[in-house]
Image (cartoon, rainbow, N blue to C red):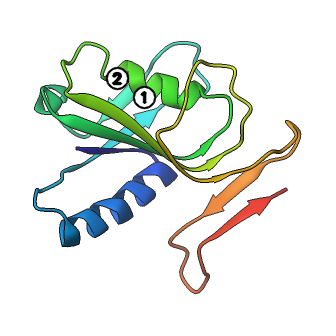
């Protein structure tokens, strides 16, 4: 199970699934998680039955890891489900964690200042994929 946190994590998860479908001897299922990142408690919308993940490996995917709040909420979605394992993938790890979160796989680790903003641009017609530091 590859769980992409909407909107950008889902795009990255879709690409990972495509690669795994070509090379892996097993099949993957792509699932989407929409989180209210501004909320002080876990509020999520799922496009799957949570029990479909029972006793399976889940890869949680997001675009940028900043404070860790989004991934912490992503973990919370699976809190009451017995999983084989839960792994995390982020494209950019900014190293500003205020939550006890770590990534299993990251594309790039950036040492930035808090005031800077990292923007990931994927699947834009006529443009290449890009990461901007502003």
Is residue 98 in sight in this rendering? yes
Q: Label 1's element?
A: helix
Tell me if 124 is positioned left or right of 13 in this view.
right
Q: Is residue 31 above or below residue 38?
A: below
Along the viewing direction, whichever of 120 and 126 lies nearer the viewer: 120
Q: Which mark is residue 77?
A: 2
Cβ atoms under marks 2 and 1 closer than 8 Å:
yes
Residue for badge 1: 74
Along the viewing direction, whichever of 95 and 40 lies nearer the viewer: 95
Q: In which quarter of the view is residue 107 placed?
A: bottom right
Where the N terminus falls, by quadrant?
Answer: top left
Place of residue 121 in the rendered image (x, y in percent of width and height, measured from the top left): 61, 65
Where the C terminus falls, by quadrant?
Answer: bottom right
Place of residue 109 in the rendered image (x, y in percent of width and height, measured from the top left): 68, 49
Residue at left offset 30%, top offset 22%: 78
Circle 2 crowding by C-alpha within 10 Å: few under 14, some 14–19, many from 20:
some
Task: Report the residue that reaches farthest toward the bottom.
Answer: 126
Q: In which quarter of the view is residue 69 placed?
A: top right
Q: How many labels, in total? A: 2
């Amino acid at each position: 199970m590859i769980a992409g946190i909407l909107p950008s994590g889902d795009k990255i998860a879709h690409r990972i699934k495509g690669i795994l479908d070509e090379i892996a001897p097993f099949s993957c299922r792509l699932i989407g998680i929409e989180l209210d990142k501004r909320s002080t408690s876990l509020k999520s919308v799922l496009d799957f039955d949570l029990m479909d993940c029972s006793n399976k490996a889940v890869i949680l995917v997001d675009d940028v890891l900043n404070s860790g709040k989004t991934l912490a909420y992503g973990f919370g979605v699976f809190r009451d489900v017995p999983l084989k394992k839960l792994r995390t993938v982020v494209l950019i790890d900014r190293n500003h964690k205020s939550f006890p979160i770590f990534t299993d796989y990251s594309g790039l680790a950036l040492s930035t200042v808090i005031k800077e903003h990292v923007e990931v641009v994927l699947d834009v017609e006529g443009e290449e994929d890009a990461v901007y530091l502003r």
